[in-house]
Image (spheres, rainbow, N blue to C red):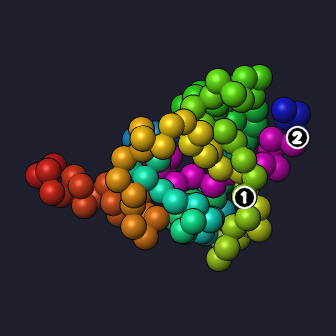
Amino acid sequence: MNQKLVERLVVAVYGTLRRGGRNHALLDGATFLGTGQIAGALHDVPQGVVKVELYRLTGSQMLARLDALERFDPDDVEGSQYVRIEVSVADGPAERAWAYAYRGPAEELGERIEGGNWVAFSRGRDRDAGR
């Protein structure tokens, strides 16, 4: 993807890439734009609402790191575990963003996360496990 195009790209993150998540460092240097909601269902692996954070990426290397984390290969969409799709954003500082959507077998998904907030869900799970 063209470097200038990537620098205008807004990405919506909903799990371990959010602030405080174990993969958030992959967004070092990205501009945090705010939060919003996108249509979708969130499961514990990752039609409801998913709470997201929105970031403007710094360039194609950052996008490539996110693609690698999500096991998305733009040259092999059919072989990818997740696909990068453009989504509408509600209640956020951008109207549209790119998000990663799971494309594997439904039986591999974990429990559905009610409320669509992965961070709150994982905190509750960690608290229940005594972490």
Which residue is disc 1 drawn over? 87
Q: How crowded is mark 2: few (under 14 residues within 10 Å), some or many (20 or more)?
A: few
Of residue 108 and residue 37, the one placed in the foreground of this image is: 108
**Viewer-proximal residue, 106 or 79?**
106
**Position of residue 66 measured from the top left corner of the image (x, y, whole percent):** 61, 35
Residue in view at x 69 percent, y 67 percent: 89
- Residue type highlighted by circle 2: Lys
103 sits left or right of 96 in the view: left
**In screen coordinates, is 58 left or right of 23?**
right
**How far across and down, in percent of the image, does residue 103 sit?**
59, 39
Report the number of discs. 2
Q: Residue furthest bottom?
A: 91
- Residue at position x 64%, y 24% from top? 79
- Residue closest to the eye, 25 or 96: 96
Q: Which of marks 1 and 2 is in front?
A: 1
Q: How far apart are marks 1 and 2 (CA)?
A: 20 Å
When the figure is inspected, residue 67 is found, relative to residue 19, above or below; the finding is above
Magenta extent: 5-19
Instruction: Please name the residue that numbered disc 2 is placed on.
Output: 4
Q: In which quarter of the image is residue 39?
A: bottom right
Residue 83 location, quadrant: top right
Give residue 100's position: percent from left, percent from top. 62, 45
Circle 1 SS class: strand
- Answer yes or no: is residue 111 visible: yes
Q: Which residue is drawn at 77% across and 23% down?
A: 75
Decide which of 74, 48 is in the foreground and name it.
48
Rendering quarter of residue 124 = bottom left
Q: In this view, does 89 lie above or below 3?
A: below
